[in-house]
């Protein structure tokens, strides 16, 4: 819905509207009488219409906020019975400001309260990590969790919450991360699995 062709459409409307106003202005002498109340109203309405069309062209040109996010752990190993830290990164590749919550849901793991961050902890298995970007930008935030005892695997599932129902927001992949057990080190590694959003 928001793209360059729509911006061109609105710019075309502006040009047509200006052409019609110009023809009326030069062909109808009474339009050039600036002190007439009727003309002042026509000028004000025309300026309002031009302003609205210009705003729509600008808004369409910005396009949506193209947000991506990832669960970054590299070669990090995770251990049961201790506090582990997972890095959550997000970036805005669009030209529009974006604010949203990345929702993480855990299976066989519990999130630990982190007083240094302004996360919303719904319960021990669901946490909301807030991100806010101007045009462009990237941010990485830590998430702490503990793996449940005596489990052979754990996983994280993600979703997004725009908060205000922002229609200018696009996410193309939803991630979930599954653990892999390493019996030699008695630890887990995480493998992120992107799933396209249609």
Image (cartoon, helix red, strand yellow):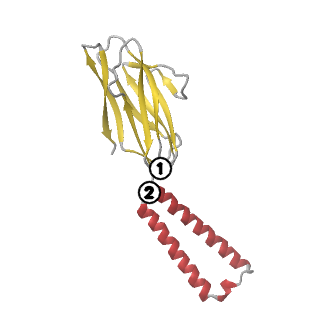
- The residue lying toward the viewer, choosing from 76 and 131, is 76
Counting from the top left corner in percent of width and height, residue 126 is at 45, 26
- The Cα–Cα distance between marks 2 and 1, rounded to whole angstroms, is 8 Å
Considering every residue shown, the one lying at the far front of the view is: 75
Q: Is residue 4 above or below residue 152?
A: below
Residue at point 67% right, 84% down?
32
Relative to 115, 159 lies left or right:
left
Question: In which quarter of the view is residue 5 placed?
Answer: bottom left
Counting from the top left corner in percent of width and height, residue 178 is at 31, 26
Relative to 25, 161 lies left or right:
left
Residue at point 67% right, 71% down?
44
Question: In which quarter of the view is residue 106 placed?
Answer: top left
Q: Is residue 127 above or below residue 90?
A: above
Residue at point 50% right, 46% down?
166
- The residue lying toward the viewer, choosing from 106 and 116, is 116
Residue at point 38% right, 31% down?
71
- The residue lying toward the viewer, choosing from 127 and 190, is 190
Q: Residues within 10 Å of mark 1 (few under 14, many from 20)?
A: some
- Give the position of the N terminus as an image quadrant: bottom left
Counting from the top left corner in percent of width and height, residue 196 is at 31, 42
Count of labels in the image: 2
Q: Mark 2 = which residue? A: 2
The local secondary structure at tag 1 comes to loop
Q: Mark 1 = which residue? A: 168
Asked whether disc 2 touches disc 1, contact meaning CB atoms under 8 Å apart, the reply is: yes
Counting from the top left corner in percent of width and height, residue 105 is at 41, 27
């Amino acid at each position: 819905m928001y793209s360059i062709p729509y911006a061109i459409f609105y710019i075309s409307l502006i040009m047509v509207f200006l052409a019609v106003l110009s023809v009326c202005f030069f062909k109808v002498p009474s339009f050039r009488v600036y002190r007439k109340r009727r003309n002042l109203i026509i000028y004000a309405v025309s300026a309002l219409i031009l302003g609205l069309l210009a705003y729509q062209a600008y808004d369409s040109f910005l396009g949506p906020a193209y947000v991506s996010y990832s669960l970054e752990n590299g070669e990090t190993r995770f251990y049961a019975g201790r506090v582990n830290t997972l890095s959550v990164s997000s970036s805005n590749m669009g030209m529009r400001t974006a604010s949203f919550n990345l929702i993480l849901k855990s299976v066989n793991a519990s999130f630990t309260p982190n007083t240094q961050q302004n996360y919303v902890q719904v319960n021990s298995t669901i946490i909301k990590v807030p991100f806010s970007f101007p045009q462009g930008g990237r941010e990485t935030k830590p998430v702490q969790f503990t793996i449940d005892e005596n489990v052979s695997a754990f996983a994280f599932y993600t979703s997004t919450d725009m908060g205000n129902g922002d229609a200018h927001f696009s996410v193309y992949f939803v991630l979930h991360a599954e653990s892999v057990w390493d019996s030699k080190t008695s630890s887990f590694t995480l493998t992120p699995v992107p799933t396209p959003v249609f």
